[in-house]
Amino acid sequence: MEATLTPRGRIGIMVEAEVISPDVFQGLGIGEIEELEVWQGPERHPLAEFFDVEIRADGSGETRILIEGDVSRVKRIGQSMKSGSITVCGSAGMHTGTGMYGGSIVVEGDVGSWAGMEMSGGLLTVLGDAGDHVGSAYRGSWRGMTNGRIVIDGNARSQLGGGIAGGEIIVGGDVENFCAIRQSGGTIVVRGSAVRGAGAEMSGGTLAVEGKVERISPGFLPAGQEVNPKLADVELMGRFERFTGDYAAFKNPKGSLLLKEV
């Protein structure tokens, strides 16, 4: 079954719409989907107040959701989804793919902060830029994403992969401050450059930055060189310096920071 959601106009106060998920839509008719409740501030509204809904049976056995338009003011799309797929033909709001277990989400524009937060499976692809805290742990938690894959074609902002314990994050552009802070596992590849604090408080996992790092954390020690390393199915070309850390935070850290020689 394929469900198409078309925004019915500009949204003012942000909408919390975790019901936009293949697991929720599965087996429902058009009227039932339209009646699903979303939150706007302290009030509940039917989904049909914000979206025109169409469904088409295709016999595939998979539930697919197509959102035709900008939903940058709609939060929690695909939250905790386990199967199926979501395609956003535009930008999406905060918490897209938060807590994903499986399935796939493609955002053809930009995505807000906290995308893929604490996800444990599935694939989140962003063709534009991403906000802060992608794939990270939530406030007060130390454990970010544990599995799955996040691919960002553009840039990401600060604290990408904060607390990541597993899985893969691939960024085609640049990142800002404290990328991979408190990383304990998993792999992060940044094709562009990073600002400051990359790998701070890292205890495990691998962070590779192909561009420049403006300010390296002081707790990393040299650990040799690698040529054309392959990480998370991504082959990095050239010679890279490997560092181990973060010794400023741990006595025997296992984190690896790979920086390309200029």
Image: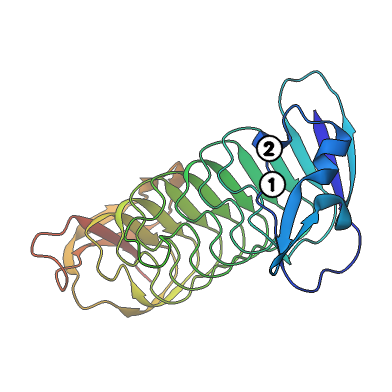
Front one among 55 and 44: 44
Residue furthest out toward the front: 43
- Relative to 144, residue 21 above or below: above
Mark yes or no: residue 190 visible: yes
Query: Which residue lies under the disc numbered 2?
Result: 24
Q: Earlier in the sequence, mark 2 or mark 1?
A: 1
Rendering coords of residue 87 (x, y %): 74, 45
Task: Name the residue: 81% across, 40% down.
Answer: 33
Left or right of 138: which side holds 100? right
Q: CA distance from mark 2 to mark 1?
A: 6 Å
Secondary-structure class at tag 2: helix
Quadrant of res 241: bottom left
Outermost residue toward the left? 251
The amino acid beneath tag 2 is: Val
Q: Is residue 108 visible?
A: no
The circle on residue 19 is 1
Q: Are marks 2 and 1 in contact (CB under 8 Å)?
A: yes
Task: Name the one closer to the observer, 232 or 53.
Answer: 53
